Amino acid sequence: MTETGSAVYVYGVMPTPSRAIASRGIQGADVAIVEHGALAALTSPLDGTTLAARDLRAHWRVLEEAFEHGVVLPVRFGTVLKSEEAVRQQLLEPNAQHLTDLMEQMAGMVQLNVSGRYEEDALLREIVLQNPQVARLRERNRSRGDQAPAGDQLALGRMVEREIARRRAADGAIVRDTLGPLASAVREEEVAHPSAFNVAFLVHRDGIDDFGRAVAELRTGLGDRVELRYAGPLPPFSFADADLAIGAGAWG
């Protein structure tokens, strides 16, 4: 139970776990379970109105440990309700069917993240080799040194930016086309240079090995201009986020 006067912080929802969550929650608090039928909300008391960066890390630690028990649906960081009874009445009870359906969809699924970062020297060499107009203007600017017209320098910068944007779009398509068929769902984030792409894939546990082999082939195909990073298996938080209208506050 929460202390008198304490609000209740909510991490996520899962089937009732067989054992307690050992990880410390926000503000170092113990994690408690608020149950409604077969559903359990992971909560802890919250004192005050301020959450720190370490509380965000604690939020994810709790959810990661919960994932070891089974399916867990995260709620937005900073979700707070007035009491345990409010957790039941505003979160669990009105959303019971939606939460149950979503947990069934996420059973046996993991998230695999694939991101890329451009190696700028290798990327620029490729652009110069493949675009004669860039190569000519670059050489002309280099030959003039500090005397190169500002207009030419600006034009070169814009041409290179367009080439990078074109390659980012093409590389993102390669990632989706190569790995997408091995996943049940794909979520792609917008990125800015020097990032090339950042894509999350929802994959069944049985398909992790096949996915890993495809990532290795993708790394070879992209060459040295992209530093490829592969993370997982992770809880499928990009696909299981319980974005619910529960009348909660968001504190930062």
Image (tube, rainbow, N blue to C red):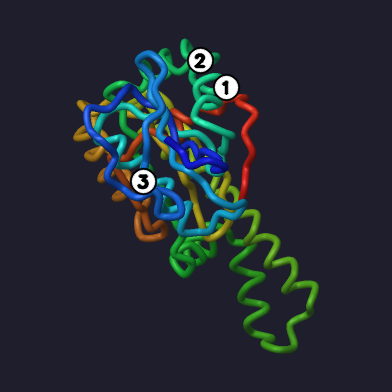
Q: Residue furthest top?
A: 97
Q: CA distance from mark 2 to mark 3?
A: 24 Å
Q: SS for tag 3?
A: loop
Q: SS for tag 2?
A: loop
Amino acid type at mark 3: Asp
Quick check: 225 above or below 239?
below
Q: Nearer the viewer, residue 102 or 202?
A: 102
Q: Which disc number belongs to residue 30?
A: 3
Decide which of tag 3 and tag 1 comes sooner along the chain. Answer: 3
Quick check: 69 above or below 230?
above
Judging by the rendered image, the residue that carries numbered circle 2 is: 93
Q: Nearer the viewer, residue 11 or 125?
A: 11
Judging by the rendered image, the residue that carries numbered circle 1 is: 90
Tell me whether the residue at label 1 lies in contact with that at label 2, contact meaning CB atoms closer than 8 angstroms. Answer: yes
Question: What is the quadrant of residue 157 in the picture?
Answer: bottom right
Q: Residue at x 36, y 53 (%)?
A: 228
Where residue 150 sits: x, y (%)? 79, 77
